[in-house]
């Protein structure tokens, strides 16, 4: 009897937390993700001395629990990323996308790139290194490279530009490590010339996109749509479409596409990369 009550309470706590995460971040947590919720929230229970998920939920319900709610949301995000992740989009960027955009913007001399859901910053820093390595003519241009994420803690790490040995071992060519990073104890710190190229800001994909960014030439929106419902994917892609110039480019993650989604993008293959263009 008491066990049934405790299971019921845990179910209710899970329902409350999954609804809170859905509303705040659009991340869908089905009932089969209960184990994930429990394991990700265990450190928060310990840190705040809650004995059960239900105790945590009681606290989350309080208006004053804003910081705790953010902590719970951030615990549920998956921050997996790496330098030059999946390589092909970056090959396409270097060989075709940037040369094309630079030609088209040669009179205004402006370039705007947005790396959305950028986690700890490897993606925008990869883009910054590609720009610095291959397009010296951009020195006289107004270049805006924005890295954004919902998770303020991971954005703090991105801003610091400090990576551990395992992180720099994943995807970053040795020659770029030696050229653009310096040792910082057991870590590596990205040099200021690259760090200062990226402007980091908090953007929640669920909310209206900041119009202050202006229209973008290239949007990276990779490995985040997988967590959302079909309706939310469509809504986010429509917002991305409105932010993108008509001749711009969108990159999604390797397992993501616009297939079966009612959106104004069509797929274009560039080398081995899938790229999406406004229709
Ligand atoms: C798996 S990482 C992808 C990182 C990078 N784009 C890549 O492909 O390597 C997913 C990121 O999406 C972020 N995220 C999840 N929900 C979000 C939302 N509603 N708005 C903005 N970012 C979100 C998470 O915080 C996390 O850093």
Image: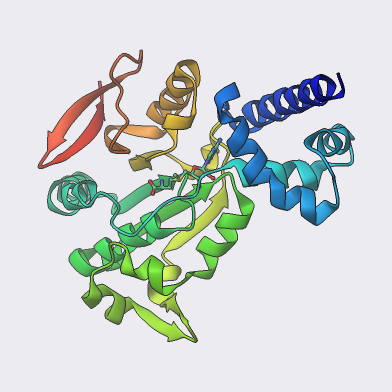
Measuring from the top left, give residue 33's x and y in whole percent. Answer: 57, 30
Residue 30 seen in this snapshot: no
Question: In the rendered view, would you say 230 is above or below 161?
Answer: above
How many marks the image carries: the answer is 0
Measuring from the top left, give residue 188's x and y in whole percent. Answer: 43, 78
Left or right of 118? Residue 205 is right
Residue at 36% from the left image edge and 42% from the top image edge? 220
Residue at 86% from the left image edge and 31% from the top image edge? 61
Residue at 43% from the left image edge and 31% from the top image edge? 225
Q: Outermost residue, left direction?
A: 271
Measuring from the top left, give residue 249's x and y in whole percent. Answer: 27, 37
Question: In the rendered view, would you say 191 is above or below 19?
Answer: below
Colouring rule applied to residues: rainbow
Question: In the rendered view, would you say 191 is above or below 264?
Answer: below
Residue 120 seen in this snapshot: yes
| Res. 272 image quadrant | top left
- Between 127 and 186, which is closer to the camera in this rendering? 186
Question: In the rendered view, would you say 233 is above or below 45?
Answer: above
Quadrant assignment for the C terminus:
top left
Measuring from the top left, give residue 149's x and y in whole percent. Answer: 53, 47
- Between 15 and 196, which is closer to the camera in this rendering? 15
Quadrant assignment for the N terminus:
top right
- Between 244 and 71, which is closer to the camera in this rendering? 71
Left or right of 94? Residue 165 is right
């Amino acid at each position: 009897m008491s066990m049934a009550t405790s299971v019921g309470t845990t179910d209710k706590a899970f329902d409350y937390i999954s609804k809170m995460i859905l509303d705040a971040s659009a991340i869908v947590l089905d009932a089969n993700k209960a184990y994930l919720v429990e394991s990700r929230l265990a450190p928060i229970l310990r840190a705040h001395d809650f004995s059960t998920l239900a105790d945590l939920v009681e606290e989350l319900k309080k208006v004053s629990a804003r910081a705790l709610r953010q902590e719970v949301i951030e615990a549920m995000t998956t921050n997996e990323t790496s330098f030059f992740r999946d390589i092909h989009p970056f090959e396409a960027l270097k060989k075709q996308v940037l040369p094309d955009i630079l030609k088209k913007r040669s009179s205004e001399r402006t370039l705007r790139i947005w790396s959305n859901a950028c986690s700890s910053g490897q993606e925008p820093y990869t883009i910054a290194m590609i720009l610095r390595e291959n397009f010296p003519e951009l020195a006289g241009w107004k270049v805006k490279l924005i890295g954004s994420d919902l998770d303020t803690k991971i954005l703090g790490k991105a801003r610091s530009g400090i990576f551990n040995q395992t992180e720099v071992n994943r995807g970053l060519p040795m020659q770029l490590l030696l050229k653009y990073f310096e040792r910082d104890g057991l870590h590596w710190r990205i040099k200021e010339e690259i760090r200062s190229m990226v402007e980091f800001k908090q953007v929640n994909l669920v909310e209206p996109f900041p119009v202050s960014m202006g229209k973008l030439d290239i949007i990276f929106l990779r490995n985040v749509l997988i967590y959302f419902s079909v309706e939310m994917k469509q809504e986010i892609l429509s917002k991305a479409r409105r932010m993108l110039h008509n001749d711009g480019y969108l990159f999604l993650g390797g397992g993501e596409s616009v297939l079966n989604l009612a959106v104004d993008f069509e797929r274009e293959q560039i080398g081995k990369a899938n790229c999406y263009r406004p229709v």
